[in-house]
Image (spheres, coloured by chain):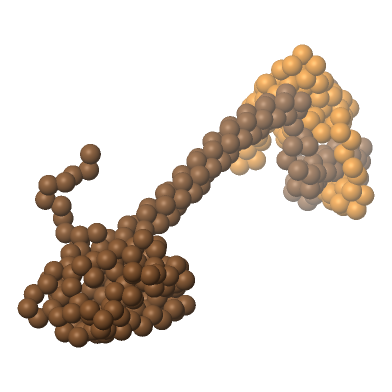
């Protein structure tokens, strides 16, 4: 219940508040979002497997996002930013699909 | 991964109750979802609002700029080439128009000289009355010669015979013949040129007027100076049989 409220609160906050995204964050936000989605899907899988830990979830969520942004930032520094961001996106996408497949098997038994 | 809750089977109602009851797990989920949702909304809004280049990296922008510069160079070169072509076409058209104008002028001049076009201009109308047979080819030729000396550019006899370079004057029993056409009396000569000079050319002592009005012929000459003499009769040009442009 709180989770749903949090989701709605996030959307409403962003719409009402309309924060201006800082320029330095612009190239990293999409990657960070995908990393966060990966953490969410992984947490959902853990919850279905009854191995969910809020501490692990919080740490993995933050570190996932931070590492994704860090990798892309370093890539920008050494001149392979767009390639590295593609690589990160591919890896995260694969992980999301894998976790989603596990969730699907657990929920739908198919 | 430490297990926070032992996996134990629950009935559906218990699951829903547990789901509804706030706890730390729920709170963590709520915070995470809130952050992600806010981030997604911000990103969507910014990519919808901002122009598409705002989120691009420096490398991409440089590449984009390079592409645009190259394209600009190509287009500029194309514009320059097209302008050159346009200028060439325009000057060509001008030259053609000038040439056509010159050719038209030449054609007009030659047409007036050859008697193939009608002509108009200031001049004189000379009317010669004389007893039949009194006027001879000599007098006629001399009159034409004097008019030409006085600067007559176009000469016409009796509103029907255009005098050109090949014109000839002859005489038969009935009277004068010019270019195979009989000349009836009285004779009118229309001439385009300076009307004063033409009048003097006919009137001088021993000229046309004094010859015709002498006792030997006993005719009369009437000279009319006109601001506008219109000559519409045409001569038929003959293709030269022997002469050709050298």
Q: Residue at x 84, y 49 (%)?
A: A11
- The quarter holding residue B210 reads bottom left
- Residue B91 seen: yes
- The quarter holding residue B110 reads bottom left
The quarter of the image holding the C terminus of chain A is top right
Residue B15 position, x and y percent, is 79, 46
- Residue A43 seen: no
Number of numbered discs on residues: 0
Q: Nearer the viewer, residue B76 or A72?
A: B76
Above or below, B39 against B134 in this view is above
Work out which residue is located at the far front of the displayed protein and give it: B215
Residue A89 position, x and y percent, is 69, 27
Work out which residue is located at the far left of the displayed protein and give it: B173
What's the colour of chain A in the image?
A: orange
Q: Residue at x 70, y 20 (%)?
A: A84
Which chain: brown?
B
Q: Nearer the viewer, residue B81 or B39?
A: B81
Q: In this rendering, would B214 be left or right of B31?
A: left
Q: Nearer the viewer, residue A90 or B5?
A: A90
Q: Nearer the viewer, residue A51 or B62?
A: B62
Q: Residue at x 90, y 53 (%)?
A: A16
Residue B184 position, x and y percent, is 18, 83
Residue B91 position, x and y percent, is 50, 44
Q: In this rendering, would B81 be left or right of B229?
A: right
Q: Residue at x 24, y 70 (%)?
A: B139
């Amino acid at each position: 219940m709180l989770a749903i409220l949090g989701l709605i609160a996030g959307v409403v906050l962003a719409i009402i508040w309309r924060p201006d995204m800082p320029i330095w964050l612009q190239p990293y936000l999409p990657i960070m979002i995908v990393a966060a989605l990966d953490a969410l899907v992984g947490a959902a899988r853990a919850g279905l497997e009854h191995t969910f830990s809020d501490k692990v979830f919080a740490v993995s969520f933050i570190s996932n996002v931070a590492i994704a942004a860090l990798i892309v930032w370093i890539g920008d520094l050494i001149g392979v930013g767009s390639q590295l961001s593609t690589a990160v996106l591919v890896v995260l996408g694969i992980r999301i699909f894998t976790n989603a497949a596990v969730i699907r098997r657990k929920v739908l038994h198919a | 991964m430490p297990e926070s809750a032992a996996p134990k089977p629950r009935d559906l109602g218990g699951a829903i109750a547990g789901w509804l009851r706030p706890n730390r797990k729920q709170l963590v989920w709520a915070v995470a979802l809130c952050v992600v949702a806010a981030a997604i909304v911000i990103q969507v809004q910014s990519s919808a609002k901002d122009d598409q280049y705002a989120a691009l990296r420096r490398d991409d922008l440089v590449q984009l700029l390079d592409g645009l510069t190259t394209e600009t160079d190509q287009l500029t070169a194309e514009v320059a080439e097209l302008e050159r072509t346009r200028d060439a076409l325009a000057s060509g058209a001008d030259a053609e128009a000038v040439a056509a104008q010159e050719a038209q002028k030449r054609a007009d001049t030659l047409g007036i000289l050859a008697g193939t076009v009608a002509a108009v201009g200031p001049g004189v109308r000379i009317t010669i009355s004389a007893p039949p047979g009194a006027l001879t080819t000599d007098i006629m030729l001399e009159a034409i010669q004097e008019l030409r000396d006085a600067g007559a550019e176009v000469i016409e006899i009796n509103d029907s015979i255009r005098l050109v370079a090949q014109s000839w004057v002859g005489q038969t029993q009935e009277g004068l013949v010019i270019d195979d056409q009989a000349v009836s009396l009285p004779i009118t000569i229309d001439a385009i040129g300076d009307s004063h000079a033409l009048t003097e050319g006919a009137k001088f002592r021993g000229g046309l007027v004094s010859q015709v009005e002498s006792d030997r012929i006993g005719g009369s000459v009437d000279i009319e100076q006109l601001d506008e003499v219109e000559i519409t009769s045409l001569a038929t040009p003959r293709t030269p049989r022997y002469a050709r442009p050298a």
